[in-house]
Image (cartoon, helix red, strand yellow):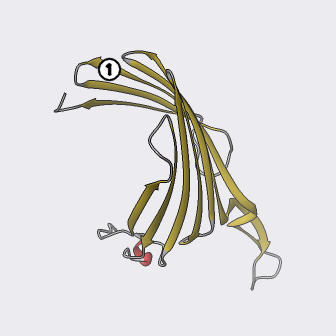
Amino acid sequence: AATVGLADIAVRSKVRLTNEGPGAVSAGVEARLPTGREEDLLGAGQMAMRFMGLASAESGRTSVHGNFTLGLGGIGREISYGGAVAVAASPRMTVSGEVLARRIAGIQRITAVAAPHPRLRGVETSRLMPVGEDQTSAFAVAGVKWNVGSTWLLHVNVLMPLSDSGLTATFTPTVAMDYSFAR
């Protein structure tokens, strides 16, 4: 069966806390409004708030970025953080590396568990059950952006899991091409 409808809507705001310059510190807030039907898996069924801190600095051809997020409500309490480094290898090419991690309270590893049948004596059943501690998923991303022409930008990235939590592939490559209508 197919489901069509409006999902939860996110409303965000971000403000820079420092003056103009090579470094910046910002704060942000996001409210996820429970507009999607939980029964149709279009929403979490309750409002969620996320509070963010962001920082970046640039020196010469290198920039460093970091962020931290605390989330409350929704599917669970969340802590996420990340850091990145980008280097302008040439006037037309940027190389970057990033590490991202996310921990959501109440999200546990799913595994097959054998248990006695609740009504049939001597019969064991296997069920998929959440077990263990809250899971942290972590990823590394390496990428290149190349200005192949005056208005064309090629992005090549590889995402690699640093943890075995959740559904993870050994690596996920992406390739994208952007075109800008303005110079």
Hey, which quadrant is residue 55 in on the image?
top right
Classify residue 83 as left or right of residue 135.
Answer: left
Looking at this view, name the residue that lies furthest to the top. Answer: 90
> Which quarter of the figure has residue 128?
bottom right
Q: Residue furthest bottom?
A: 119
Q: Is residue 59 above or below residue 130?
A: above
Q: Nearer the viewer, residue 20 or 169?
A: 20
Residue drawn where x is 34% and y is 25% of the image: 154
Mark 1 lies on residue: 147
Does 150 sit above or below residue 56? above
Three-letter amino acid code of the residue under disc 1: Asn
In front here: 85 or 102? 85
Q: x, y (%) of residue 38?
A: 44, 76
Residue at 37%, 76% in the rendered image: 35
Q: Residue 142: give x, y in percent of width and height.
A: 54, 29
Task: Check the image and name the residue furthest to the right.
Answer: 122
